[in-house]
Amino acid sequence: MDSATAGQPLVDWARREWLTNTPAWLDAYPSFLNMPDSVRAKQLILLDVNNRVVGLASVQSLMDKYKPQWAE
């Protein structure tokens, strides 16, 4: 996977959740497992329900925290 497409699963997940306003994390999770460590180390901006910035977290930390039961 080249560096230009390595993070595409994140883009697809965010776009799907944003445009459809439906949860897509569990469906996207298997794709996240195939991303390189360098992509999973990237920081995401966390927002609350009022769209205020509440922090930063790496993709990997979110994957660890919100791991599907089948991935445990």
Image (cartoon, helix red, strand yellow):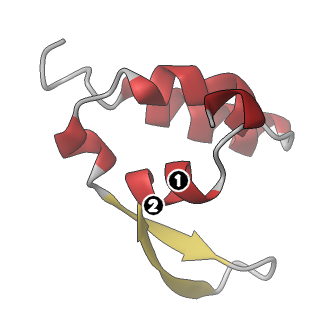
Task: Give the class, few, some or many, for how many residues have Cα within 10 Å of label 2's Cα (few <14, many ≥20).
Answer: some
Query: In the structure shown, which secondary structural element does the residue marked by tag 1 occupy?
Result: helix
Quadrant placement of the C terminus: top right
Task: Give the class, few, some or many, for how many residues have Cα within 10 Å of label 1's Cα (few <14, many ≥20).
Answer: few
Give the x, y percent position of residue 25: 69, 38
Residue closest to the eye, 28 or 12: 28
Query: In the structure shown, which secondary structural element does the residue marked by tag 2 occupy?
Result: helix
| Above or below 1: residue 23 | below
Residue under numbered circle 1: 64
**Residue positioned 45% across, 60% down in the render:** 61
Residue closest to the eye, 69 or 58: 69
Q: State the CA–CA distance, disc 2 to disc 1.
A: 5 Å
- Dot 1 amino acid type: Asp
Say which quarter of the image contains residue 41.
Answer: bottom left
- Dot 2 amino acid type: Ser
**Residue positioned 26% across, 41% down in the render:** 39
- In the image, is 32 to the left or to the right of 17? left
In the rendered image, the residue lying farthest to the top is 1
Residue under numbered circle 2: 61
| Above or below 63: residue 17 | above
Q: Are marks 2 and 1 in contact (CB under 8 Å)?
A: yes
Give the x, y percent position of residue 6: 26, 25
